[in-house]
Image (spheres, rainbow, N blue to C red):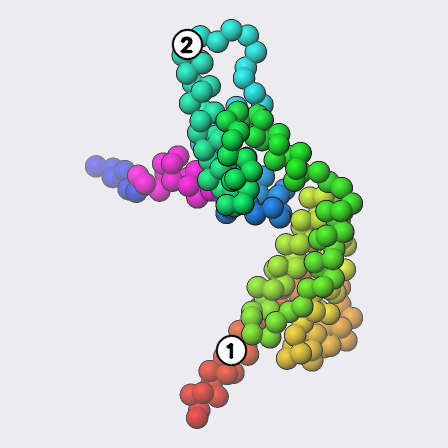
Amino acid sequence: TIQKPYYRHCDFTMAGFADALRPDKFTGVHFKRWQIRVTLWLTAMKCFWVSTGKPEGILTAGQQKQFEEATTLFVGCILSVLGDRLVEVYMHMTDAKELWDALNTKFGATNASNDLCIMEQIHDYKMAGNRSVVEQAHEIQTMAKELELLKCVLPDKFVAGCIIAKLPPSWRSFGTALKHKRQKYSVERLIASLDVEKKAREKDAASKVDGG
């Protein structure tokens, strides 16, 4: 007999998939990134369609019920992933399109002030010596990606140079060595190099401890 492969049912349910897509709470920053995740999440929940408003024409009783249920689910989901301060502002909205449009109007505008705010964050970013440099490099990369969503693309080599310039004091010699190699580092390649160096340092530190 041919045995059928065993799959755990819970791993393949739409509910489990939708739950995995659930975004973190939106606090007023990085709206574009949050919006993309919410769109995917609510699409998986089969209720994002109500964000464009009620379908035109006369609805049957069944269609009306479906629209109302999807609207309730949509609004409830959105409010559940808004920060407490924002929930108080938008909790009175019960129409999906009104709520979605209000968030887009408030936070989705791609204007110069948003660009400048993120550029300022990158400029003022300081790496801490007591945190993973790889993790912090990813944070700078994320801010650069945020600018891309705002149609302000920074050259990859510029972002890589920015990361090197912001390395903490204990990493300055490593950063200087990278500059002297005169190679064009992509952000991904640079982060990979930082990860290799980090692991090597952790190994050396562990060896010193074991050696007394």
**Looking at the image, which is closer to me, 15 or 60?**
60
**What residue is at 53 percent from the left and 24 percent from the top?**
95
In terms of image quadrants, where is residue 20?
top left
Q: Give x and y (percent) for residue 73.
A: 44, 29
Q: Give x and y (percent) for residue 143.
A: 66, 54
Q: Identify the image quadrant of the C terminus.
A: bottom left
The reply to whether residue 41 is in sight is no
* Disc 2 crowd, CA 10 A, few/some/many (<14, 14-19, 20+): few
What's the mark number on residue 202? Answer: 1
Q: Give x and y (percent) for residue 159.
A: 72, 59
* Span colored in magenta: 9-23
What's the mark number on residue 69? Answer: none
In terms of image quadrants, where is residue 111?
top right
**Looking at the image, which is closer to me, 97 or 212?**
97
Q: How far apart are marks 1 and 2 (CA)?
A: 65 Å
In terms of image quadrants, where is residue 125?
bottom right
Query: Please, is residue 37 above or below residue 65 in the view?
Result: below
**What residue is at 27 percent from the left and 38 percent from the top?**
4
Residue 178 on the magenta segment: no
Residue lying furthest bottom: 212
Q: Which amino acid does label 1 sit on?
A: Glu
Query: Please, is residue 36 above or below residue 193 in the view?
Result: above
Q: Identify the image quadrant of the N terminus.
A: top left
Q: What element carries label 1?
A: helix
Instruction: Classify residue 83 as left or right of residue 174.
Output: left
